[in-house]
């Protein structure tokens, strides 16, 4: 197979896009690798109908451990824990008197956490946003929908667009430079999760996010385009 891979990998390595695609609600300075420590940045881009955001409560999904939030210019962070001491939610609240007269600011809320070892799955962080006027009138917006928010068939992910999507992270497998072998346990139907890879192989099928490399794959004798990955499939990915 190496003789077949050689020219394709050379082209992929020289033309691979370095563009970064950031999530609208939660992101990080590094990719979200399964089983790794991750520093998450939750963003609050707007308030509610002209009112300032005064409180943000982020639910922590099961399997996420080692949660340590950051206080911010927005306000201090408080954690909620279950009977076993696991953090289940983090709430940032503005100090009394700090609510602004209008919806004028963009906020960052950060925390560090250990991600579960479940590659090719989506983590959802249901979030409650509370906005307040200086007169004390509150409006609550629930960012909790998981519809249309995943690359696999977890829950109702991918079932359609939503006006209030929950912030989400798609967990990528850990990797080393060069070839990596994985046995995929989830159905992956959106192969753009491999956009930072040079090429993906499964048997006689291959995929590359780079359009030039993908065109070469489709012209290679005996090779067909890889369009989705079923549970239990062994793949080889070169980074």
Image (cartoon, grey):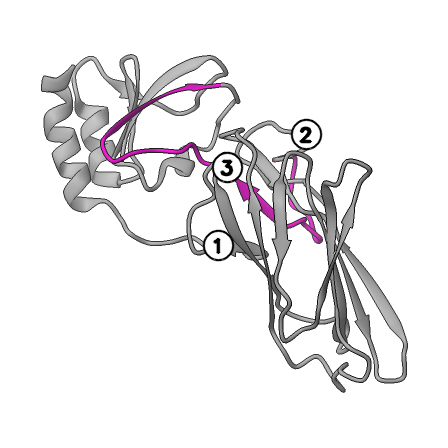
Q: In the rendering, at what x and y percent does residue 131 appear? A: 79, 71
Q: Nearer the viewer, residue 238 or 117?
A: 117
- Is disc 3 surrounded by few (<14), some (14 to 19) or many (20+) residues within 10 Å? many
**Range of the magenta residues?**
158-184
In the rendered structure, does residue 168 fall within the stretch colored magenta?
A: yes
- Tell me if residue 156 comes above or below residue 54 in the rendering: above
Q: Which residue is mark 3?
A: 171
Q: In the rendering, at what x and y percent does residue 198 appear? A: 25, 36
- Tell me if residue 58 comes above or below residue 115 in the rendering: below
In the rendered structure, does residue 207 fall within the stretch colored magenta?
A: no
Q: Residue at x 89, y 84 (%)?
A: 135
* Mark-to-mark CA distance, 3 and 2: 15 Å
The earlier-in-sequence mark between 1 and 2 is 1
Q: Is residue 83 left or right of residue 191?
A: right
* Mark-to-mark CA distance, 1 and 2: 24 Å
- Tell me if residue 192 comes above or below residue 43 in the rendering: above
The earlier-in-sequence mark between 3 and 2 is 2
Q: Is residue 141 left or right of residue 25?
A: right
Q: Residue at x 18, y 45 (%)?
A: 15
Q: Nearer the viewer, mark 3 or mark 2?
A: 3
Q: Which residue is mark 2?
A: 155
Residue 23 seen in this snapshot: no
Residue 203 seen in this snapshot: yes
Q: Main secondary structure of the magenta part?
A: loop
Q: In the rendering, at what x and y percent does residue 174 appear? A: 40, 33
Q: Residue at x 35, y 41 (%)?
A: 195
Q: Is residue 79 left or right of residue 233?
A: right
Q: Which residue is mark 1?
A: 28
Q: In the rendering, at what x and y percent does residue 237 appear? A: 30, 27
Q: Residue furthest bottom?
A: 101
């Amino acid at each position: 197979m190496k003789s077949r891979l050689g020219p394709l990998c050379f082209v992929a390595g020289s033309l691979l896009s370095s563009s970064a695609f950031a999530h609208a609600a939660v992101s990080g300075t590094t990719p979200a690798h399964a089983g790794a420590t991750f520093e998450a940045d939750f963003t609050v881009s707007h308030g509610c109908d002209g009112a300032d955001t005064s409180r943000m409560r982020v639910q922590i999904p099961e399997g996420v451990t080692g949660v340590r939030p950051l206080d911010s210019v927005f306000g201090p962070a408080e954690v909620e824990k279950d009977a076993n001491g696991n953090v289940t939610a983090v709430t940032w609240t503005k100090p009394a008197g700090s609510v602004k007269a209008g919806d004028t600011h963009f906020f960052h809320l950060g925390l560090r956490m250990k991600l579960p070892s479940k590659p090719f799955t989506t983590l959802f962080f249901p979030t409650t946003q509370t906005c307040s006027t200086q007169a004390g009138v509150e409006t609550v917006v629930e960012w909790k929908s998981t519809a249309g928010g995943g690359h696999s068939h977890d829950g109702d992910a991918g079932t359609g667009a939503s006006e209030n999507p929950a912030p989400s992270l798609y967990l990528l497998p850990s990797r080393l430079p060069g070839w990596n072998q994985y046995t995929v346990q989830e159905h992956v139907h959106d192969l753009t999760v491999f956009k930072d890879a040079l090429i993906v192989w499964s048997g006689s099928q291959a995929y590359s996010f780079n359009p030039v490399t993908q065109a070469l794959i489709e012209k290679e004798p005996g090779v067909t385009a890889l369009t989705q990955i079923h549970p239990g499939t062994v793949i080889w990915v070169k980074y």
